[in-house]
Image: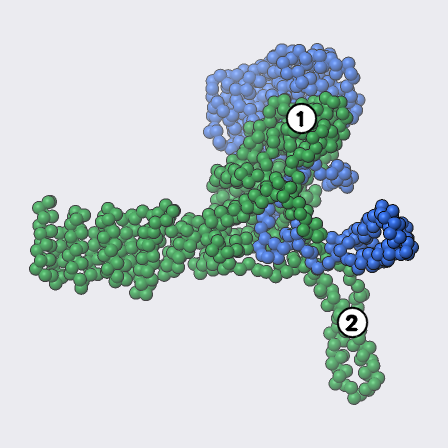
Chain colours: A green, B blue
Amino acid sequence: MVSPSHNAPGLSKNMAASGRHAGHYINKNSRSLLNHLDKLLGQRGFALSSVLRQQTATLQNDSTEAIVIPRKKTWGKEAVLEALASTVNRDPTAYHYQFQDDPYLSPRTSAESKLYSMSQESGRAAAKYFVDMYPKYFTKDFAEPHIPCLMPASVALSLEEVSEEALKERIGLRKVGAAVEMYDQLVQAGTPISKQMTYDLLDLICFYGDREPAQEGEPEADQTEASAEELRRKRGRFHRASDTLRGVWRENNNAERLFRLLPEREARCYSAVIRGMVKHGAFAKAFDMYTDMLNNRLTADVDIFNALILAVPEMREAYTEKVDFITDLLNQMSQQKVQPNLQTFNNVLKVLRRCGALAKSISLQTLSEMKALGIAPSLASFNHLLAIFYKGGSAADYPTDILQELLSEIETISFTCQDPEDVWFFSSAMKICLETKDMKLGYKVHSLVGVGDNWRLLGDSYQQGMFYYRFFSLLCLMEHVDVVLKWYHQLMPSLYYPNPQGMRDLLQALDTESRLELLPSIWKDVKTLGHDNKSDLVEELLSLMAREKHSPEVQESFADCALDIKAAFDVDRRKPSLEWSPLALGHVTTLLLRAGRIPQAWEMMQLFKSKNRIPSEALLEDFLSQCSGAPTTAVELVKLSAAFCLPATPQLAQRVLLEFDLTEDQRTTLSELESSWDHNE
Amino acid sequence: MYRGLLRTARQCAFSLHQTGALPPKCDNAALPVFRLGRSVGIHPFNTSSTSYCENKENAPAPPQLKDKEDAQKDSASLAAPTDQAKVEITAECEGTNLPDNVPPPPQAKYKEDAHKDSDSLATPTDQVKVEMAAECEGTNLPEQGETLLKTPLKTEEENQQKTEERQPRVKTGKESLLDLLVAMKVDVTTSKKRSKGTKIPARHEPTVTPKPAAMESTHSMFQKATVEASIQSDAQPSVASLSPELVAAASAAAASLPDPSRAESELLQQLRQHEAEPEDHKRGEANNIGNIIADMKVGRPAPRQHARSSNTIHFDEDGRGYKKSLFERKRLGIFNPATDEESTDAAIAGPNLWDTEFANLLVRTANHMPRNGFEEMIQWTRDGRLWQYPIDNEIGLEEEAAVAFHEHIFLDRHLEEGFPRQGPVRHFMELVVAGLSRNHHLSVRQKTEHIDWYRTYFQEKEDVLKEAAAFLN
């Protein structure tokens, strides 16, 4: 969790110190040497002595300081590796280290990368599962010294008899049901159970809400958990809080039963039960329990208050009531001489998010209170603060003051994860930057990620993707296209897999700066990213290319690109393939025509027919003007047009008759076509 | 006189309620009017309250989202300054409007600014206003009307109770107005409660004061619990203790109710509340019943006041926006910086399941994917899978570190006992020892075990050896 990164500066300091040491040494020696030389050489040694004199002059100011012998430094076991790791910079052209394996397996799309990392994880989990489940096959210990993490962990119950030892084992292995059963048997047998053990059992039951915990070691459980998480993310952040409280606190469950059986109830028991109740959604009961505790003349601990504060929004409806309730709880805390911790204030801020505009000033006061108490806020505190100040859509009313101020405060701080919600900060901060279209702030947020180990708090791949997507969209909106492309190449394969929307933003940026000649290379990236089956993206790309005429070279590259796109349509893959739309067909044909590739363009015209799409008149006109030297093609075109029953057929036929050098046969067919059309009319 | 005045106030309120001049939902503008009417009606010197209230009646109900300050201005302008009370109220309204009119902050369009600014003055009169504002926010109109209607039911006796104390203090102006308002509010709640019928605590405690009753009237039990807890801690909970008889009686009474445990805890709370009261009386200043009631009110309005007063300061101090650094603003002022004593307390207990699970959650939350090979090696080092850097080939030999080298090498002393002094066995064992002394794979303990094994072996085979005469020769 916390990496002792302070070692690196320590190293440099130490080096500096030794450098100074050496300086002292030279200084001292040079002076004594100088004296000697003066004596020995007298006037003749002027050249040499002047050099030494110079040296003393430069070191004069240093000599007044007392010599401090640095203390012996004991290095952590990771210090060397950390120093080495700090020398490695990110290679923007490479995939993430995690994916550096067989080049064939390198994930090129976000879906593939997710698949890769998940299969990596599940492979590890499966291996661990087998090692733990069948320890009898893994008895040989090759390693010396012994490596505990490679040996099977005991997951099965070994003690069968009814004893406190067995209870302890069941608690340690988180077997809620078995532990409760053992406890009951012990009580029935009249065996005395130590207080500590009882409390541990109560903790266990309350934590899991009198339910068996989901087995983490089992691969299939992991998978379902992961997919559930996926779902939760898709539904957005607002549902998260309620989802985590999925578990239900059943009436008269084992925790309450055990609690009632306790001969003397200490604050710790109340703490366990209240936290369990809040965790599993029994908010009103938690407050009942708290009242009960006060009646028993006990003072609550900080965990109780933390839990109760979280439960406040479920107890009160109106914003003012919620705020009052929180203030009241905090006052009670201070009256009971309970020192708050970071979690207390984070919970307060979290609850204030649901208090509307009223929360604004109070949240700032809360932050000042933290400062006054010497509690450094974590990123989660700031995230809550931002959420309070930037309610969806109202960003225009509140300029980015708060974020600006916040960033100037924390610019250089390296954070560690102290709250599970820390990881939401960066993506929501970037969201605000995007909404307010503040590029400077966006850069600031991005540079904050680079400070220290802050990148660790970017969250999982989804949150990370959101962060970079927002940053990239902001860049596309606000920055010059060269800068955008610079960032694009810096972020693209190593950190961020742009989604179709991100690519569309990039296309728009290129469009506004009229740098459309870059489109073919973008198409290549689109293909690599696996977005070549997103029809709207492909069509947008095509329409941008076909919109205007460009220089011949550009047209040439566009035509190549168009053929490539055509291939993407044709390829039959497991992915849902693209459907030709008349627009896309038309664009591809136009591009081919502009590059003078008549045969390929003619193939496209055939495609219209086979796909039952109808070409536009303008396209047919264009086609005619391009194929001036090929009367056969022109006649065929008119035939095609007639087959589609296009109203423009007679005009086309006339034009061909006028402009082209036709054979007699062709003339007759054309006239027939023209007349038959008229007849039809 | 009071009765008459109050009745007019009530009629006024009632008519307002009946005519439906006010929107059904809580109206920002109309409620202060209510309150003003009431406060005016209570004041002993007010004689023109009826007309005042009538004025109010005619006041158009502004749209729901209109700023409250508008309403205050309205009331100020409508009220003809004919008597002392009204002048006071007008002044107060003006006073509170003042910060609004002076440099309008950019955020001034927000509704809550009105709330904030009304708190800017710390004079007691403001408290009245705060009350009003609070009422406007929270309760909805029909409730208001109801409480107002019930007021006269109770006010008669209450007023009689209070006349003695009010008479001497009556000339203190604002203070007395505040006291009376606070008292008035309590009366309202009391009457509400009593109209529901007698409750159990009344049976146990013959000296019922308005205090517990007021507590009862809060509509939620938890709010009550918290309010009482705050009062209780005010009154130094260590002093109060219940006699066992009382507790027994309370639980007996509670048993007859549908929800015994809750009722019991309620009763116990009430009882302790009453016990705490004599302490108040002992303090001296509490002989004034009005003061007790005023004390009691501290529980509820205080946080509200607090919340907004700080708001005001925030806006007053910085004029526009936030000039100060983010952390240097006004703070909540609830906690005092920690002393070390408490922190040690928690450390002794050691981590429990909750702590370890929280730590695990944090570890899972943060991204620990290595970015390069060295970081991966750091992870492996932490897992204990990798040799530590700088390389030290004595890692994992911590037990051996305590053993001196001579114990490894000079093993002859182990041959002193149990082996013959000479002969082939001795010779063999010397060879064994020589071999062991060169063996770096075994620990000293293993070496001695090795020798011990030979010792027992030769002792077991002593007969055979003797037969072969090899034991000694």
Residue A587 marker: none
Q: Secondary structure at mark 2?
A: helix
Name the chain under label 2: A
Q: Residue furthest front?
A: B467
Q: Which of the two labelled residues, at mark 1 and mark 2, occupies the earlier sequence position?
A: 2
For label 1, the residue is A181
Q: Which mark's residue is nearer the viewer, 1 or 2?
A: 1
Residue A619 appearing in the image? yes
Q: Residues under labels 1 and 2: Cα distance? A: 74 Å
In the picture, measured across the screen, residue A60 lies left or right of residue A178, that is right
Q: Residue A18 lies in what quarter of the image? A: bottom right
Total numbered badges shown on the rendered structure: 2
Looking at the image, which is closer to me, A457 or A166?
Answer: A166
The quarter of the image holding the C terminus of chain A is top left
For label 2, the residue is A25
The amino acid on which the numbered mark 1 sits, given as a three-letter code, is Glu
Looking at the image, which is closer to me, B77 or A663?
Answer: A663
Q: Residue at x 68, y 48 (%)?
A: A141
Name the chain under label 1: A
Q: Residue at x 84, y 84 (%)?
A: A39
The amino acid on which the numbered mark 2 sits, given as a three-letter code, is Tyr
